[in-house]
Amino acid sequence: MTKSNVEASFHLLRIAEEDNGLILLMAEQVMHELNDNESYVEDEAKRSLVKFKSQAIRVNDVASFLVLKII
């Protein structure tokens, strides 16, 4: 799947959610899989954001230390 495929998919989904006449047909299995995996994906995203924030804070701390040391 390419980036343009993903962007097109999100564009179609936005149009369908706005109730502009676009109807999406989705297999029941897809809905079950989405429901089953939604909380896992959300938890994984939260863990990734916490890790990123921690790393960003460490980088900022090191950069601040180096700037103070140079001055």
Image (cartoon, rainbow, N blue to C red):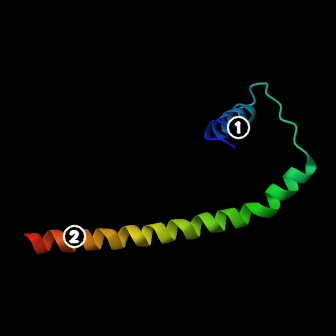
Q: Residues within 10 Å of mark 1 (few under 14, many from 20)?
A: few
Q: Residue furthest left?
A: 71
Name the amino acid type tagged 2: Ser
Q: Residue at x 74, y 60 (%)?
A: 38
Q: Badges 2 and 1: C-beta atoms under 8 Å apart?
A: no
Q: Quadrant of residue 11?
A: top right
**Does residue 30 appear left or right of residue 45 in this picture?**
right
**Label ID, residue 17:** none
Q: CA distance from mark 2 to mark 1?
A: 42 Å
**Does residue 57 appear left or right of residue 44 in this picture?**
left
Q: Secondary structure at mark 1?
A: helix
Q: Position of residue 57 (x, y in %)?
A: 36, 70
Name the amino acid type tagged 1: Ser
Q: Which residue is mark 1?
A: 9
**Does residue 58 appear left or right of residue 67 in this picture?**
right
Q: Eyeballing the image, is 68 above or below 5?
A: below
**Does residue 57 appear left or right of residue 17 in this picture?**
left
Q: Which residue is mark 2?
A: 64
Q: Residue at x 86, y 51 (%)?
A: 30
Q: Secondary structure at mark 2?
A: helix
* The C terminus - image quarter: bottom left
Q: Position of residue 61 (x, y in %)?
A: 28, 73
